[in-house]
Image (spheres, rainbow, N blue to C red):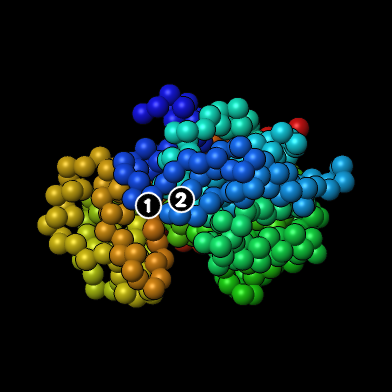
């Protein structure tokens, strides 16, 4: 490994270990690649017989790209750059603005070659810059940078990337147009119920993947919520967070922290994995009633189904009861959960439950997101009078109830 690659990867690993690992795993460059000189004398990359940058003057190409999105002082912007190449565009943006920048390189071979050749440590060390390897990581990076939906998002790319990644770039353009439509952005004080289905209550708005939700959002995609910072007074969610995986949940909690008013309260509930373990240990199949488990299944299948389930009534992964008991008896809690999740059939058209949450796990995620005064609560026993209403908590016997606050200014 070259010193240049090592320096670059250490900075990337600080916020995205998976990406750094994937880059390091690229052992062989399968397409022909060559470092050449452009007509201007600046370096260019010839990848699979295609110039990655304008071969007349790659530096001027980067200048033109930046000038296209240059705007008046005072407008808050976040810049998405599709394609790293040799870093000309990134360097130009980093020199000209201290606004937030997320750059994505979809080609792992180019990423490996460039990070071997070009020292980008000055740019990658800046707190306002993130590198991503795919669209999902690009979206996640905007959340990590606390992108405010009152900001304007720009998208920039070069001819090379537009030629080979046309569909993906056009899809991003459509998404940005929707995000930049400020009429759809929540910018006034509000209260939100996350994942409530058809639930309604005066003074509250809903956030869900369903068409009738006030805010349509797929929590399994790390997409920032169309809500400005510090406007949400209360957040409630009942039996929703077990439907998303850990990295999606971590992203969601950071987004909720961003949009909450200081001193705002959040109350979350979900199936309690610790209680599920106890029910299995005590051979209490009745506990699993109402947790979307399959009727007639043995208790081991019900335990797995609590953490992984598919379409309504179809249950979850099929594993012999003897194997479930053996794993339950020999594995630590987190290892057992990891083993259960390894059986997810991701070819299914719909996956309902896909997580196992217990208090200490959720408490750590909330702390990492910035929340304070985290407390394990109980059914209809919120610290907030409104949240004690019967319109909120459900599934009394099987649920974990947790409350927390965003710190006051």
Q: Quick one: which residue is furthest to the front in this view?
A: 39
Residue 52: image x %, image y %? Answer: 54, 50
Which corner quadrant of the image does residue 24 belong to? top left
User: Could you tell me which residue is drawn at 86 percent across and 42 percent down?
Assistant: 74
Residue 175: image x %, image y %? Answer: 65, 63
User: Could you tell me which residue is drawn at 42 percent across and 46 percent down?
Assistant: 33
Report which residue position mark 1 lands on: 31
User: Could you tell me which residue is drawn at 31 percent across and 41 percent down?
Assistant: 27
Would you call the spot at circle 2 few (<14 residues within 10 Å), some (14-19), or many (20 or more)?
Answer: some
User: Could you tell me which residue is drawn at 48 percent across and 48 percent down?
Assistant: 46
Residue 42: image x %, image y %? Answer: 60, 37
SS for callout 2: strand
| Residue 404 seen | no
Relative to 405, say whether 30 is above or below: below
Verify CB contact (< 8 Å) between mark 1 and mark 2: yes
User: Relative to the observer, which residue lies in front, 273 or 4?
Assistant: 4
Point out the image quarter for the N terminus.
top left
Residue 324: image x %, image y %? Answer: 18, 55
Q: Is 230 positioned to the left or the right of 28 in the image?
A: right
Q: Quick one: which residue is furthest to the top in this view?
A: 3
Relative to 260, say whether 125 is above or below: above
User: Relative to the observer, which residue lies in front, 89 or 323?
Assistant: 89
Report which residue position mark 2 lands on: 47
In the rendered structure, which disc, 1 or 2, sits on the residue that comes first in sequence? 1
User: Relative to the observer, which residue lies in front, 187 or 307?
Assistant: 187
């Amino acid at each position: 490994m070259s010193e240049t690659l090592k320096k670059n990867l250490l900075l990337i690993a600080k916020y995205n270990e998976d990406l750094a690992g994937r880059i390091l795993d690229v052992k062989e460059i399968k397409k022909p690649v060559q470092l050449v000189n452009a007509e201007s004398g600046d370096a260019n990359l010839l990848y699979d017989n295609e110039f990655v940058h304008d071969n007349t003057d790659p530096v001027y190409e980067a200048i033109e790209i930046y000038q296209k999105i240059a705007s008046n002082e005072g407008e808050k912007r976040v810049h998405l750059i599709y394609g790293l190449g040799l870093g000309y565009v990134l360097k130009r943006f980093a020199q000209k603005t201290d606004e937030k920048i997320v750059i994505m390189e979809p080609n792992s071979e180019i990423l490996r070659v460039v990070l071997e050749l070009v020292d980008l440590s000055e740019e990658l060390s800046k707190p306002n810059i993130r590198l991503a390897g795919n669209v999902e990581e690009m979206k996640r990076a905007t959340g990590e940078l606390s992108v405010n939906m009152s900001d304007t998002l720009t998208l920039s790319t070069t001819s090379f990337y537009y030629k080979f990644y046309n569909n993906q770039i056009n899809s991003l353009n459509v998404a940005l147009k929707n995000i930049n439509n400020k009429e759809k952005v929540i910018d006034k004080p509000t209260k939100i119920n996350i994942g409530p289905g058809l639930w309604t209550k005066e003074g509250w708005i809903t956030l869900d993947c369903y068409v009738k939700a006030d805010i349509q959002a797929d929590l399994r995609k790390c997409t920032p919520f169309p809500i400005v910072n510090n406007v949400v007074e209360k957040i409630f969610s009942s039996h929703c967070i077990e439907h998303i995986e850990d990295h999606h949940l971590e992203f969601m909690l950071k987004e909720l922290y961003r949009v909450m008013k200081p001193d705002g309260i959040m109350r979350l509930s979900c199936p309690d994995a610790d209680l599920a373990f106890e029910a299995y240990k005590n051979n209490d199949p009745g506990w699993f009633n109402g947790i979307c488990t399959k009727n007639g299944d043995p208790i081991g299948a019900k335990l797995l189904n609590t953490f992984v389930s598919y379409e309504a009534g179809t249950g979850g992964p099929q594993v012999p009861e003897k194997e479930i008991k053996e794993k339950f008896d020999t594995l630590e809690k987190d290892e057992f959960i990891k083993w259960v999740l390894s059986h997810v059939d991701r070819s299914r058209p719909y996956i309902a439950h896909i997580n196992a949450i217990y208090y200490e796990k959720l408490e750590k995620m909330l702390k990492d997101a910035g929340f304070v005064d985290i407390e394990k609560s109980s059914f209809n026993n919120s610290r907030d009078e409104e949240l004690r209403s019967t319109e909120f908590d459900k599934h009394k016997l099987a649920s974990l109830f947790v409350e927390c606050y965003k710190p006051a200014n």
